[in-house]
Image (cartoon, rainbow, N blue to C red):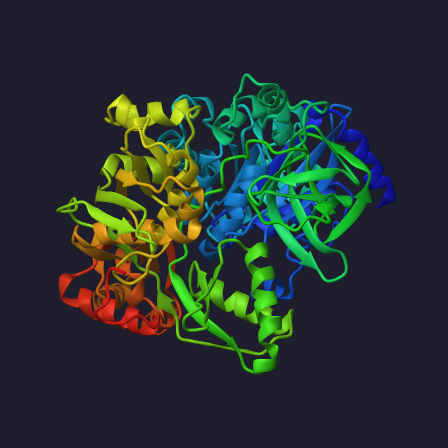
Amino acid sequence: MVKMVEKVMEAMKYPDRIRNIAICAHIDHGKTTFSDNLLAGAGMMSEDLAGKACVMDFHEDEQERGITIDSASVSMVHEFKDTPYLINLIDTPGHVDFGGDVTRAMRAVDGAIVLCCASEGVMPQTETVLRQALKERVKPILFINKVDRLIKELQLTPEMMQERFVKIIKHVNKLIMQIAEKGYGEKWQVNVQDGSVCFGSAFHNWGLSIPYMKANNVTFKEIIEAYENDTWKELRDKAPIHKVMLNAVIEHLPDPVVAQNYRIPKLWHGDLESLDGKSLQKCDPLGKMYFVITKTTVDPQAGEISTGRLFSGTIKKGMQAHLNMAKTDARIQQVFVMNGAKREIIDNVPCGNIVAIGGIKSAPGETITETPSEPFEKISHIFEPVITKAIEAKNPADLPKLIETLKIISKEDPSIKIEINDKTGEQLMHGMGELHLEVIENRIVKEKGVDIKTSPPIVVYRETITKPSTDQAEGKSPNKHNKLYFRVEPLEVEISEAIKKGEIPEMRLKKKNTEVFSKFAELGYDTKISKKIIEVFNGNILVDETRGIVYLHEIVELIMDMFENVMNAGPLAREPCMGVKVKLLDCKLHEDTIHRGPAQIYPAVREGIRGAMSLATPILFEPVQTLRFEAPSEYMGEISKLISNKRGQLLDMTQEGDSVTVLGKMPVGEMFGLSNDLRSGTGGRGSSSLVDQNFERMPTEIQQKVVNQIRERKGLKKEESSS
């Protein structure tokens, strides 16, 4: 292993020979088996264990369930045309509940290998991972896996297999065209001829691409014959999957210098013409250090280990660092190269690499630099947490340990939101789905050793408004010396969509964010109005329409703090808000600083915004998921009955051969126990996967009942609805 570390350190010095890649796919399409093969090819594990060891699934629960839950990274060296290349690889989860890990991994990489099962084709999660990659300007290539199943199980002719490949490639290219930003969809199409599409079997350790077949004189006919004659074990020597795939990675995926040139303008909103901007775009090892954390793990011996991407400068052991979001200073105590669950200590690393550091207490999404600087755009996830459980320690003496454990968990997995309700003393855990929360509960008990009990799952709703507020609302400070006036109105659909797609970043805006203002203008805002927008937060915006208020600049940060606070807990039931435009119209401020501190301004802003929302007919939106069900066709009636029983809506039904695919839309609140109902309704032969998730207006007849239930649960007065 020492020799391997030396090789890695040597290769790190040449940015044009580095490839930062992620492996992503729908659940069970073979990612972890595939990563094992790449590791075996690089001499980092036994070839006979590849596909069985699942080296990248090193958590006990991952091995028990047979799925990847955490992304894991590894650095390895691959020789191509007699030149050593460094491949920094991240294996990501496929289950939608752990999609947050995929999004964070995409910040660290420049290219992605999208795996697709040859027999199942493009599945909902394949589309989601493509969306996650393209959102971060990560270039994809395609690997069609499990080709052995087409030959052995389905016994397809070469012509039929070709038809199937063409169908998958067309589907993937169509998605790339639809999802990618203008100019990238055409440029990043994958095709068989140039080798950006490969196919093979990760389980049987072989892979092929047209360039490899031509260069090594291998034909597809030989592959079919090997299965007919039961000599397929020889294929891994004839067409080793790691060689074929890593050659394709080096040929088709960009090095950090090329990638950062077009990725930095998208991910970093600082001045591109400044020294920092140029250093980031050039990936300059002599520039200022910019390190973005994409994963945090807590090691009982070594403390917090933060893995991430170094975009600029060189990171050294003992270096002084500044955390730009936490606004604190720290020291980097150690620098590591990652190797799955193991770490190798090294002294320094130049930019363009994925590395880990120790000694920093932080969280994914943090930008670490030497001195205070413009941070990278926050990492935004495609799906939001929609299910909550209250959690408490069985033994009251374990409460401090539980709170500490929950803090660690929310660092290790930021898709889990932990909230401690001061009024009720509840600890709340918000997650992506039932499985997500179940896995976290198991880890708290098994790995952290805390006995817990949890409540039945609770759904997280959204609050919004239906019309502009009828009048302006006044917020008064407790000392009555400061008054702020607000109005609210529903946010335009085009703006909401642009924020959701990531075209408008969620951030506090400054005068220099001209690109964001011009995006608002492009979507129909008057230029003067767009320049008055001071914050975009969780799909809501804050506009400063005041004129000539002398002390406003001193309290503007406090106004934004409380705007965020109300958008996280609206007037109806203290649920998060969406699609709200808040306008600050006027304010009367005391001239003495001491009379307009946080203790005075916070309550005034909170009261003003909640008051304005109460005048705009606030309503609840509930989370709704679109699911794709697959089952033998005789269960068609059972599935449609299941959907209608859960207040759902049948969207589409297609029958192919003797199996049926059903698309249905259901409120998350009705979906608890869905997987058990599906299993019993289809004799265990039905499966479902998430296609999309959004929020829709809740039926009026159950609105008030749900609001009352939430208020009661949160310990709020029933009639109180705007304070």
Q: Is the residue 241 above or below the residue 340 in the image?
A: above
- In this rendered view, identify the residue nearer to me: 145 or 680: 680
Q: Is the residue 247 above or below the residue 258 in the image?
A: below
Place of residue 645 in the rendered image (x, y in percent of width and height, measured from the top left): 22, 69
Total labels: the figure holds 0
Place of residue 38 in the rendered image (x, y in percent of width and height, measured from the top left): 68, 43
**Which residue is pictured at 54% across the width and 16% down the height?**
273
Residue 53 shows in this picture = no
- In this rendered view, identify the residue nearer to me: 398 or 138: 398
Q: Is the residue 45 above or below the residue 285 in the image?
A: below
Hey, which residue is sitting farthest bottom in the picture? Answer: 395
Hey, which residue is sitting farthest right in the picture? Answer: 2
Hey, which residue is sitting farthest top in the picture? Answer: 273
**Which residue is pictured at 53% across the width and 34% down the height?**
376
Left/right of residue 258 with respect to residue 50 in the rendered view = left
Place of residue 27 in the rendered image (x, y in percent of width and height, measured from the top left): 49, 53
Left/right of residue 307 with respect to residue 482 in the rendered view = right
Quadrant where the C terminus is found in the figure: bottom left
Q: Is the residue 58 above or below the residue 504 in the image?
A: below
**Which residue is pictured at 64% across the width and 70% down the height?**
448
- In this rendered view, identify the residue nearer to me: 359 or 310: 359
Place of residue 478 in the rendered image (x, y in percent of width and height, measured from the top left): 34, 56
- In this rendered view, identify the residue nearer to me: 475 or 426: 475
Left/right of residue 88 with respect to residue 454 in the rendered view = right
**Which residue is pictured at 69% across the width and 48% down the height?**
360
Residue 596 shows in this picture = yes
